[in-house]
């Protein structure tokens, strides 16, 4: 991230800010200021072997020195954005008198960049770190000798280095050769991503068909995938496949990175010796089709409706059709004659003998397999609704004076939540997100809105009007709010839900914690799993 921000301590022509020494003569003054190309965070971040620029903008100093840790290189400038090769200068040096330095970080870990300035007058630096203003005064070391000693902490992220394991029947498979791994149709392999070097935040395992020479690839070549670090992947299709993993590092205020690894051993799926059965979760789709997955591909068949029974809320419903899924021959698509609704409880049974797999196994009967109903969260993907991947679209609002961060300390689901904190003197902690596509609301319909809150025990000063609120406008009338005052429980995740009707298009969402009137509130809450969905009720 090249979020170039200027941090400087001089008020001069409305550009600089800080504290000027007492007047002595025209153009005789001392001021402290500095700049770095990575922003104003308390701890800066950079990828291994990448560079960062620091500039001392001070004036009137008697002495000035940059000091750096070992395994940080001075680079020759200027450097253009598209440059990929750099020239190291003064190799091994850790001191310089230059005003501007370009540093390459050649070792992972926490590093220090120190700026030591001596002035003949007292100066004060006024800065801002992570949105918080602060002042740093000089220290007198001798007559007419005042020092400001500043250390920048830089976290250097290592290159992602994958540590992978594949297990078959709980036995690790050697990955250092190209021998074929044989798997029966319907069996699984366990894929384990144990990568820690480079501090990745996510990954995607992919299983793809091995194509013949000259055959163009297509998205349908991916037959299975998973974003889990520990993934059990079932191989349903007969054929030869290859496995790969894309490991990524993403998030707010950290340098992005990715690395892809190909498992060199091909995976050959052979006909199964096991029963042909349901394998996985039965799911309703957006068009009310119910998909039923099986442990193998189906051979061609004629209409099998007579062998299936579908019950909706305990009542048998007529079946319109049962066909093979157009892109995955291990799935049957079931369509009913009548409309189904999200609150319905649906089960499916099979009692026939006609359906077979491509390796000639007879489908085994099953009874009352439950269907998971279709549920689309209109808020969007997990980075918006659940703050995953750093919740990068969420920001503190312009009027928020409390603490607003995406945190991994508590979460209702996934691995992150939104943390909002108030201390005495602060009016509100408020986060805002702009929705890329917005949420279209039909004014004639009712919507369910829901979120989860964790209140850290020990909150004080929570008398009225202290509250949390979720709103779709920037005013102070939340569409949905709740108190954080007792008897509301703390120390556990609470779910708040209500019906909503309102505006036709939601483009922004706000979530805030508001202090009491004297602003004496001390409270920390976490919020997770924002949810908006059209409410369905069976007539």
Image (cartoon, grey):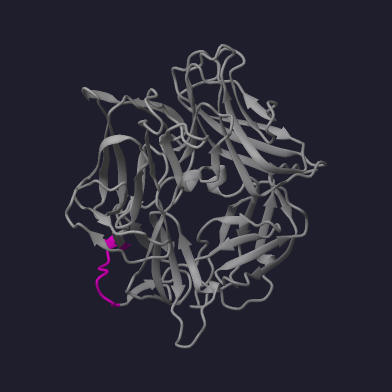
> Residue sitting at 39 percent across and 60 percent down?
258
User: Which of these two is toward me, 346 or 212?
Assistant: 212
The reply to whether residue 415 is in sight is no
> Residue sitting at 45 percent across and 72 percent down?
208
Q: Pinpoint residue 277: horizontal percent, then vertical percent.
A: 51, 64
Q: Is residue 108 left or right of residue 44?
A: left
Residue placed farthest to the bottom in the image?
A: 214
Q: Pinpoint residue 239: horizontal percent, then vertical percent.
A: 44, 78
Looking at the rendered image, the quarter that the C terminus falls into is: top right
Q: Is residue 505 left or right of residue 66?
A: right
> Residue sitting at 69 percent across and 29 percent down?
475
| Magenta segment | 166-179
100 relative to 183, above or below: above
Residue placed farthest to the right in the image?
A: 444
Q: Magenta segment: does it hold 177?
A: yes
Q: Could you tell me how many numbered marks the image carries?
A: 0
User: Which of these two is toward me, 90 or 250?
Assistant: 90
Image-quadrant location for residue 244: bottom left
Q: Pinpoint residue 516: horizontal percent, then vertical percent.
A: 57, 15
Q: Is residue 147 left or right of residue 186?
A: left
Q: Is residue 334 left or right of residue 538?
A: left
Q: Magenta segment: does it hold 501?
A: no
237 relative to 340, above or below: below
Dominant SS of magenta comes to loop
Q: Pinpoint residue 135: horizontal percent, then vertical percent.
A: 39, 26
């Amino acid at each position: 991230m090249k979020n170039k921000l200027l941090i400087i301590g001089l008020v001069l022509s409305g550009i600089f800010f800080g504290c000027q020494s007492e007047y002595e003569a025209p153009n005789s003054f001392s001021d402290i200021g500095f700049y770095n190309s990575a922003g104003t965070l308390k701890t800066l971040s950079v990828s291994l072997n990448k560079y960062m620029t620091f500039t001392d903008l001070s004036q009137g100093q008697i002495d000035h020195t940059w000091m750096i840790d070992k395994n940080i290189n001075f680079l020759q400038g200027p450097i253009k954005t598209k440059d990929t090769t750099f020239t190291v200068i003064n190799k091994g040096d850790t001191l310089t008198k230059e005003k501007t330095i370009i540093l390459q970080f050649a070792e992972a870990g926490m590093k220090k960049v120190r700026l030591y300035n001596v002035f003949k007058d007292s100066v004060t630096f006024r800065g801002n770190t992570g949105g918080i203003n602060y002042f740093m005064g000089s220290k007198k070391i001798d007559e007419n000798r005042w020092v400001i000693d500043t250390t920048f902490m830089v976290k250097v992220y290592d290159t992602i280095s994958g540590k992978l394991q594949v297990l078959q029947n709980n036995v690790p498979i050697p990955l250092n050769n190209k021998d074929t791994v044989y798997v029966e149709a319907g069996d699984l392999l366990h894929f384990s991503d144990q990568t820690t070097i480079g501090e990745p935040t996510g990954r995607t395992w992919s299983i793809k068909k091995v194509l013949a020479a000259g055959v163009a690839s297509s998205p349908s070549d991916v037959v299975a995938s998973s974003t889990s670090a520990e993934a059990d992947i079932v191989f349903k299709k007969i054929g030869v496949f290859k496995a790969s993993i894309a490991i990524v590092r993403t998030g707010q205020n950290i340098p992005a990175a990715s690395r892809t690894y190909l498992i060199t051993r091909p995976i050959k799926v052979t006909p199964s010796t096991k029963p042909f059965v349901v394998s996985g979760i039965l799911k309703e789709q957006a068009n009310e089709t119910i998909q039923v997955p099986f442990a193998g591909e189906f051979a061609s068949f004629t209409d099998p409706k007579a062998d299936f029974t579908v019950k909706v809320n305990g009542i048998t419903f007529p079946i319109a059709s049962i066909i093979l899924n157009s892109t995955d021959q291990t799935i049957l698509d079931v369509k009913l004659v009548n409309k189904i609704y999200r609150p319905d409880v649906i089960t499916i049974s099979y009692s026939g003998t006609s359906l077979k797999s491509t390796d000639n196994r007879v489908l085994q009967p099953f009874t009352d397999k439950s269907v998971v109903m279709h549920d689309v969260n209109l808020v969007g993907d997990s980075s918006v609704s659940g703050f995953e991947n750093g919740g990068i679209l969420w920001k503190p609002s312009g009027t928020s004076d409390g603490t607003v961060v995406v945190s991994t300390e508590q979460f209702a689901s996934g691995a992150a939540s939104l943390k909002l904190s108030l201390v005495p003197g602060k009016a509100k902690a408020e986060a805002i997100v702009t929705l890329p596509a917005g949420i279209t609301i039909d004014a004639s319909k009712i919507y369910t809105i829901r979120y989860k809150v964790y209140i850290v025990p020990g909150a004080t000063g929570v008398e009225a009007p202290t509250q949390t609120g979720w709103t779709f406008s920037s005013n102070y009338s939340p569409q949905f709010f709740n108190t954080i005052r007792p008897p509301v429980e703390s120390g556990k995740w609470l779910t708040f839900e209500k019906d909503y009707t309102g505006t036709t298009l939601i483009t922004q969402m706000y979530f805030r914690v508001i202090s009491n009137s004297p602003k004496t509130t001390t409270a920390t809450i976490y919020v997770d799993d924002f949810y908006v969905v059209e409410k369905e009720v069976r007539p």
